[in-house]
């Protein structure tokens, strides 16, 4: 049985289809995957008090699901995996601190230490995409997450924040990772 793919967008995104997400959804569905791509509640600040219950109660993310999290969505994916089993996750433009940003501080994701061992134990695999020219997330943030989680790591030097500020309408490398882990 193919896993369901659950997409979590970043904060400040007013709709799930930003950047490459619409392309990914279409590619997955054409290959017979069930998908869950919806705009998250409280999509500007992206508070954990709303996002984690949304993933639990509305999306009903479970053990046969792959979470694809972009930016703040990757933070939600990691926090979700601290307490829930999932098949795997793809973290895009991820980080581990509030980046000194007031809105990130408000999100609640950084109010407690990370349980890296639980994040790893609750899934079969974790892939990660970072870019060294990301104007939002310093590359050291992503490398730190990679070191903690021993992710399948892909680092680019030209992808910015994977759709911001430069447009990115497809993401074949991400699709390839999902397909590889869905065999």
Image: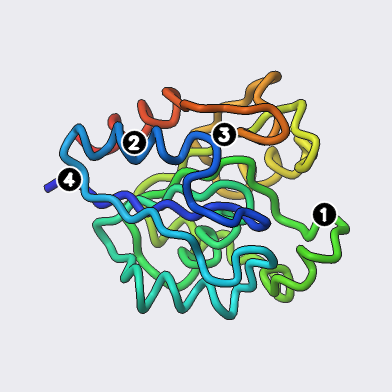
Q: Position of residue 96 (x, y in %)?
A: 70, 55
Residue sitting at x 53%, y 59%: 78
Classify mark 4: helix, strand or loop. Answer: loop
* Mark 4–mark 3 distance (CA, rounded to whole Å): 23 Å
Q: Is residue 47 left or right of residue 102?
A: left
* Percent of width and height locating residue 9: 53, 52
Whether the residues at callouts 1 and 2 have beta carbons within 8 Å, the answer is: no
Label 1: which secondary element: loop
Circle 4 crowding by C-alpha within 10 Å: few under 14, some 14–19, many from 20 = some
Give yes or no for contact between labels 1 and 3 (Cβ–Cβ under 8 Å): no
Q: Between disc 2 and disc 3, whose residue precedes?
A: 3
Furthest-left residue in this view = 1
Disc 4 to disc 1, C-alpha distance: 36 Å
Q: CA distance from mark 2 to mark 3?
A: 13 Å
Residue occupied by mark 1:
99
Which disc number belongs to residue 129? 3
* Alpha carbon separation for disc pair 4 and 2: 11 Å
Which residue is disc 4 drawn over? Answer: 2
Q: Which quadrant does the C terminus fall into?
A: top left
């Amino acid at each position: 049985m193919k896993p369901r793919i659950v997409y979590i967008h970043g904060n400040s995104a007013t709709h799930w289809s930003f950047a490459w997400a619409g392309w990914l959804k279409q590619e997955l569905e054409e290959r017979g995957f069930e998908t869950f791509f919806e705009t998250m509640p409280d999509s500007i600040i992206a508070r954990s008090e709303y996002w984690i219950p949304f993933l639990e109660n509305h999306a009903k993310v479970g053990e046969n699901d792959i979470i694809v999290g972009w930016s703040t969505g990757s933070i939600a994916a990691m926090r979700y995996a601290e307490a829930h089993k999932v098949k795997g996750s793809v973290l895009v433009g991820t980080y581990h601190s509030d980046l000194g940003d007031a809105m990130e501080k408000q999100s609640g994701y950084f109010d407690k230490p990370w349980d890296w061992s639980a994040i790893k134990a609750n899934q079969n695999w974790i892939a990660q995409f970072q870019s060294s020219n990301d104007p939002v997330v310093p590359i050291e943030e992503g490398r730190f997450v990679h070191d903690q989680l021993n992710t399948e790591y892909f680092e680019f030097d030209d992808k910015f924040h994977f759709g911001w500020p430069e447009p990115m309408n497809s993401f074949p490398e991400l699709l390839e990772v999902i397909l590889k882990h869905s065999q």
